[in-house]
Amino acid sequence: MENFRNWAGNYQYSAAEVHSPESVEQIQELVARSRQVKVLGTRHSFNGIADTTGCQLSLQKLNRVIAIDAERRQVTVEGGIRYGELCQYLHHEGYALHNLASLPHITVAGACATASHGSGDRNGNLASIVHAMEIVKGDGEVEVFSRDQQDGPFNGAAVGLGGLGVITKMTLDVVPDFQMRQWVYEEPAPGAAGKSAGRDFLERLQRQPVYGLEELRLPSSLD
């Protein structure tokens, strides 16, 4: 595909064709008849992990919420849903994800498959809430991986980098919705007024956790 680049624009893909299937059955057919398939998310990778000279497959049309289980606090979604879409739905239902990607347009399946980190030193990465996955394997057959399977291969599948197949469905653990706040500081002005503002800034930082860090080593003086 000529001039088909990643999100940053630093990488040009080599795929001969790009498909956007609308069902799992279409994915199975495409995978079964293709020599090589790579799944394309929102093209946020800065390298060629999603590139191929064969067929690229986009899940952008498989972006629905399938079900929410209030008793188990889980939501099941299609593989192409993005964080912005999912979080709006969860908020309306009174739920949230424990951690988020830095941008709302990133796909949930892509972020989990690459172990994207989110924020906070006490929060698990984005893949840590995956409870189950439905994958179309290289032969076109469907397989389900779940934490409910005793001694199963789930832990190796959650962060699979696309190597196991196409993630068509995911079940995620959710939490009750919550509010967040953000402190935004402007650079202190020069002179005595700036030093006074800077001291207030340091004092507030010492009292407030920043990005989940409860202890910060901060200077005691601006001199």
Image (cartoon, grey):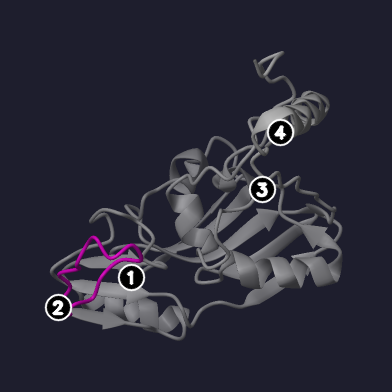
Q: Residues within 10 Å of mark 3 (few under 14, many from 20)?
A: some
| Mark 2 lies on residue | 16
Give whichever of discs 4 and 1 has the lower sequence position: 1
Q: Is residue 31 at least partly visible in the picture?
A: no
Quadrant position of residue 170: bottom right
Q: Main secondary structure of the magenta part?
A: loop
Q: Residues within 10 Å of mark 1 (few under 14, many from 20)?
A: many
* Left or right: where 40 falls relative to 62: left
* Point 27% across, 54% down: residue: 49
* Point 53% across, 42% down: residue: 117
* Left or right: where 166 falls relative to 213: left
Give whichever of discs 4 and 2 has the lower sequence position: 2
Relative to 128, residue 93 above or below: below
Q: Nearer the viewer, mark 3 or mark 2?
A: 3
Give the CA separation, mark 4 to mark 1: 64 Å
Give the CA separation, mark 3 to mark 2: 36 Å
Relative to 42, residue 17 above or below: below
Residue 106, image x and y in percent?
50, 63
Give whichever of discs 3 and 2 has the lower sequence position: 2
Q: Nearer the viewer, mark 4 or mark 3?
A: 4
Per the image, label 4 sits on a secondary structure element best described as: helix
| Label placed on residue 140 | 1
| Mark 4 lies on residue | 194
Per the image, label 2 sits on a secondary structure element best described as: loop
The residue range painted magenta reads 1-16
Give the CA separation, mark 1 to mark 2: 20 Å
Of the pair 19 and 41, the residue shown nearer to us: 41
